[in-house]
Image (cartoon, rainbow, N blue to C red):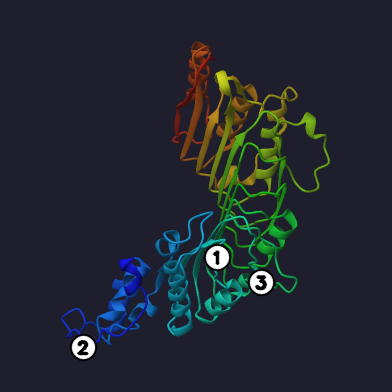
Amino acid sequence: MAAESSLVAGEVGEGEVNDDQISLLPDPILTMILSLIPVIEAARTSVLSKRWRFLWTSIPHLDFDDLFGNFFPIGGYPSQVGEKCVSIFNQIFERRQAHINSCDVPIFDDCPVDLDKFFILLDKLGIQHLLLSYFGTDPKSLSSLFFCNSLKKLAILFFSVSLPSQFNQLANLQALELTAVTITGNQLEMLVSGCPKLENLTICQCLDLSDLRICAPNLLLLDIYVEEDEPRFRVSLIKAPRLKHLVFCYQLNKNVLFDFSEEEDEEDENEIDEVVKLIKLLMNLDHLESFSFRCGPRLFKQYECSDTSFNIPIETNYWEKQKPPECLKSHLMTIQIEDIRLSSKNVIEFVKFLLVNAHVLVRMRFLYWKSFRDQSEEDIVVNELLLFNRASQNALLEIKPGRKLHGF
């Protein structure tokens, strides 16, 4: 393979390339230029001259997607070229002295990277942003990762996470994203509690996570996505006093129930509508400024649809008895609700409750599933909401169909 001969640093041989205008630029500018191209291409510049030989090992952003993705396909085996890719990977960190701003690393079963050694080197080099993805079947240990105190932003995809027994904290972590990660509620609670500066938390399709308990005094954004086939999911926001932005996205299965309640709540869950539990959740979020809720029912074959999220009836005059959350009075400015059927009366009452109590509301966006069977009834509901009395008279209320429900 032609690329094989120029993958690693080497001597040019006779007649080194003379410095041109680009080569006269200072090292920080040259390394920034090299960070804009794939790592494998940056490595090839090492043959240009002695000046260029190790410049590529100091680039501030390292993206190994192209380097590893081409030579370690899922289910494949490392080729000779692939082994040289790992050699390049090791050279970068062993010879590097400059700090690393960010690094994207995909890990494959057949990619012989020593992760413990890698994480130790990252910590020494002051890594700030790390995106770590796993593609394979053989579990990898991430224990050493949770001692990288320089990390400010961490994204983990497809790994199984288990904290080391000596884990204390990631003192500087500000943003954490977990996607398709296998982690228990206890482990997640320990991880989040060990990040005192955490401001942004994203949890997407995390396996084994049935009870979400969060203690994060500086959390500003919480974004949760739950897949339709995951088991029963319970959210308990124990302590998030500064939370300003809340996003819930649920792709529901008719056999899946979701529980939004406080940890101490012992009421009969079968008698409480999910939207009622949302109100209880909002009660604890005094500084919430934006709230986005998406609850999409699952579409089955033959266009069968099941929307079970808000079907349990609640008592008469329930909403009149509820004390509005503090965030509705003074902070909540934007609300977005998506993928809801207008035939669900409890949802409509929930929206009315928000409208009549959201005193500083600037905009509410309501996207509903449009059916063919109940168009006239939908029009009545939409007009009723548009004309409904609002606490914030100047608030923009946008109600329109999102996706269509065929056969209904």
Q: Is residue 349 above or below residue 27?
A: above
| Image location (x, y in percent) of residue 181 | 62, 54
Element on which disc 2 rests = loop
Element on which disc 1 rests = loop
Question: In the rendered image, which residue does mark 2 sit on?
Answer: 14
Q: Which residue occupies 67% across, 63% down?
A: 191
Q: Which residue occupies 50% across, 31% down?
A: 366
- The three-letter amino acid code for the residue at tag 1 is Gln
Q: Which mark is residue 174?
A: 1
Q: Quadrant of residue 308?
A: top right
The mark closer to the camera, 2 or 3, is 2
Element on which disc 3 rests = loop
Q: Which mark is residue 169?
A: 3
- The three-letter amino acid code for the residue at tag 3 is Gln
Q: Is residue 74 above or below residue 305?
A: below
Q: Could you tell me which quadrant the N terminus lies in?
A: bottom left
Q: Is residue 24 above or below residue 40?
A: below
| Image location (x, y in percent) of residue 109 | 57, 61
- The three-letter amino acid code for the residue at tag 2 is Glu
Q: Can residue 283 be seen by looking at this rendering?
A: yes
Q: CA distance from mark 2 to mark 3?
A: 53 Å
Q: Can residue 200 be seen by looking at this rendering?
A: no
Q: Which residue occupies 67% across, 39% down?
A: 279
Q: Could you tell me which quadrant the C terminus lies in?
A: top right
Of the image marks 1 and 3, the number of the one nearer the N terminus: 3
Q: CA distance from mark 1 to mark 3?
A: 12 Å
Q: Bin the neighbour count of mark 3 within 10 Å (Cα to Cα): few under 14, some 14-19, many 20 and up.
A: some
